[in-house]
Image (spheres, rainbow, N blue to C red):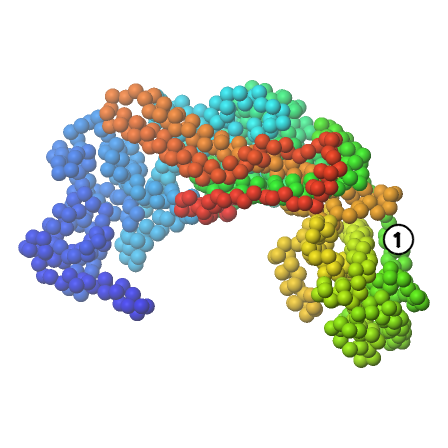
Amino acid sequence: YWPGYLDELIRLDGRAGFDEELCPLCENGAAEIRCNECQSGELLCTECIKHRHEYLPLHGLQRWNGRYFERLSLHELGLVVQLGHRPRSSCLASTPRNMTIVHVNGIHRVKARFCECDVSVERWQQCIRVGWWPATVLEPETCFTLALMRLFHTLNLQGNITAYDFYCTLEGLTDGWRLTKLPDRLPSFMNIIRQWRNVKMLKRGGRAHEQDGVSRTKEGSLAVLCRACPHPGKNLPGNWQSVEASFAFIYYLFLSKDCNFRLKGQSRPSKIPDICLSAGWSYFVENKRYMEHVKKYADEEEAASCSLFKAISLANARNSKHLNATGVVAETCARHELFRSNGLGDLQKGERFCNVDYVFLSSIVGVALVIVVTYDIACTYFKNFWKRAKSFPPCLQTSLPPHAVIPKVNKAHLVGHGDACQGPFSLNYTTGCGRMNGEGCERCWACLNRAAASVKEMGESARRETLDNFCGYSNWMKTVRLGAYLLRCMVQAIREHYAHREEFQAFNNHLLKKHPEQVLKWEREVLEWEADTSLPCPYQASKPRITLAKVKAQLAKEEANCTAGGEALQAPSSVAFVAFGLELEDLQTSLRDDLKEDSRGHALDTAMLYDRRARLRKKISHYQEAQSVHMPGLACSTAPEGASSASKSVQPEEEQLYLPSNIADPASRVAVCGEAIIGIEEQMRVGQAHDALDELRRQLRYHMFANQFKIQNVVGQHPNTRARKWLAAIDGRAIIAKHAYRHARAALLTLRGPGAWEEDLQELQDDDVRALNERALNEQEKAERAFLCRKAGQPYAEEILSQVVDGVVQLGEGRRTISWIWYHGDLSGKSDDAEMHEALRVEWTKARARALRWWEEVVLLDEEMWRAIAYCHWQADWWVAQAPCRVTNVQSLREGLFAYSAEQAAANRALAAGWSRRWAAVRDKARDIIDSEPLPSASDDISVDHLTSSTGSSSVTPIIDVDLEPAVEGDEEDDELY
């Protein structure tokens, strides 16, 4: 079809089949003119084309000159547009005048006649009533169509198309060859854009419905508010202040603050006064009072912080010459990422507290809720905040007590803070915060940063108004997509709640059986710390008493014993016979592992290899002699020839031992060795599996310490090489223990078959082999490791697939789970193993915090869904009440006021109805979680039977059947916004 499309396109450059000589309408004039905008494409005469376009003066025409089409305008044909009159009527009292009209299809010259009959309707009003926005109110000669303004406004906000680029595009549409001198209306277009943005914001804020609405506009009243955040009197119940203490957090206000040094403002001295059209009406604070306040702190230095992030120091180093703003500071809703009203202000010199204080206090004027506010330097910022707040103007004074403002540090930034900040300022360990990460303000900058280059060159007021507009657009897009966002968050929260609650209960119940006094002590410590964070942090491990020398000594001892073997048995009993078989399995595995290492370039001494094989072969020979006594039926079974005597053609490490578990068929197994031998091996395999788990946990503890020691103390290539060597030795022993457990469990599965015993001795996956302070690698990280091995030309050696999560807080802490190996079996090891108890304490407190935070997240999301719906109903009722507020005698204006109010009310009710339907199923699932206890207390009287039945058992996570597909076109972009 490619050539066909090309042919059809070039066919349109001719008359496209309309080759009649006479006009098809009047059959009089010559058919030589066609319209580029009309669909038919037929050629008409001059009079007919003028008559058809009497009310379409901005269509572009073409005239056929016998060879090709030439550009033509209705202005050249003498068309006159009558303004201020109904169609098909004219005003003869005025004379036509030439005007420049800029439309979506180009720049047009139009001849228009203003009405002089009704002097009450001014000329600028006549222009707007036909859809033309005048460049001046005095004697308008240039207008921009409303369709053009709507198109540019949307393209500017969504596509970041600047006014200059857009106007150049219009010039290209008018004359692509640039042969015609076009009027330069770019300066007028720039001014009109400011007017359009301001008037549209006033209209959407309901100011047209108020008497003297524009002049009486209040600061912050034109901002788009977050519908899911609490607003007393709008979306909160009447008795919200009397809620029980355990649910008080649902009425917290979560805020986030941050500074952006990309949104600079160039200093542009000019004799023309800088006129502000919206002084603090939406997102930026009122600039005059703000600057008067900032001037008092001209000598104040920028903020200091314990954080390792260098944004603050870099901001200082940047050149601020010829800039009236080095960036902006913003306050946003932390959970839904909407800009707060009066929550933005310019920065003049780095990140100073005087700027941040003013914007923060402006954004919480009139707020009577408990506020949780995140800031990347909150640990430093809030030390003297209340002392500084007393010096602010009365209009910014807050009635909130200091304990009602809870400062926290964003999760991604807290990692770079000192140890003293890790616990007290962590959202992971703060009651009532759910799974909020506090980084909402950081993500909000994505919308504004697109306009950074263009707003830098604007005047001061124009820059702030443009950024206000971008903030409003960002808030509105997140509002209409709130349905899909909260639904997705709730589905995830319900799933994670059940997973982390089940994990904590299994871990907690097992510890209660083994160490009930310790668990009760840990719970008391956590509750005391939550009440007073100056106490020692229970989420932080004390300095480990295990030393590197101790680890190395233990490894050396194990390596010395790895090749040691026992003496051959002379007359073994049944128990000794089976034990001897298990010992031989271990020796075979050890020799195979050493040979595998040798194949990768580690030379194994030939004499040592010969000696080990000879000794192993001798032991196998003794074993097979005993086997003929204890397993007499083996010779008559399906075993291959040579089972009774060591085969000379098979190396001893590959020799089949034919223990009962090696015989798959149950009937044959009983016939070969009898029930007694089978029962003995069953019991020994259980012990072998538990021993392997103990060894695995022990090596993983060494692995955990070794990683911590390497990260904190090892620097340089040579020390790192040596550290990796003994780390690899530890990992190798953990892998041996992993295989030993798998082998013992597989043998037990053959002997016993599936059963209740599998609850305690579960299947061990690679992802389960990780230390207490580690998380499993995701698929992308595994693929990256494999890729690096391939790129280096090395085989992908078996290793522990985990990532260290060290310290009090780390990214991903809220979704991390504990491997089942840490809450099954005997965790304590020796009774005096203080290191193990310390590690268990830290992981118990973190697992408890994760389970609680996911429960809180479900509760918060359900409340936010209710609030969003309630806000829509309040907004609808507000618009209905606004309709009659303004008294006017102009019937058409009154009708417009009522129509706009009714339209807005209907849209809000439709939005609420759509959200209610979409959230109904998932809110029903969440109700069971909300009505249940967050977590059982360790001090509750739990019976041993209950502990035994719940340990290792899996609760059933309910299936959530909800529609996650976008309800409206555009919801598929939610992942980019959130």
Is residue 39 visible in the rendered structure shown here? Answer: yes
Query: Which residue lies under the disc numbered 1?
Result: 549
Q: How many marks?
A: 1
Q: Would you say 911 lies left or right of 777 here?
A: left
Q: Is residue 502 left or right of residue 277?
A: right
Q: Residue visible at 76% across and 72% down?
A: 637
Residue at 71% x, 65% y: name it. 665
Q: Front-most of 893 and 149?
A: 893
Above or below for 531 versus 686: above
Q: Residue at x 79, y 33 (%)?
A: 521
Q: Residue at x 80, y 70 (%)?
A: 633
Q: x, y percentage for residue 78?
A: 15, 47
How far across and how far down the image is residue 889, in percent?
25, 21
| Residue 216 against residue 187 in the figure, above or below | above
Image height of 484 relative to 896, above or below: below
Q: Quadrant of residue 878?
A: top left
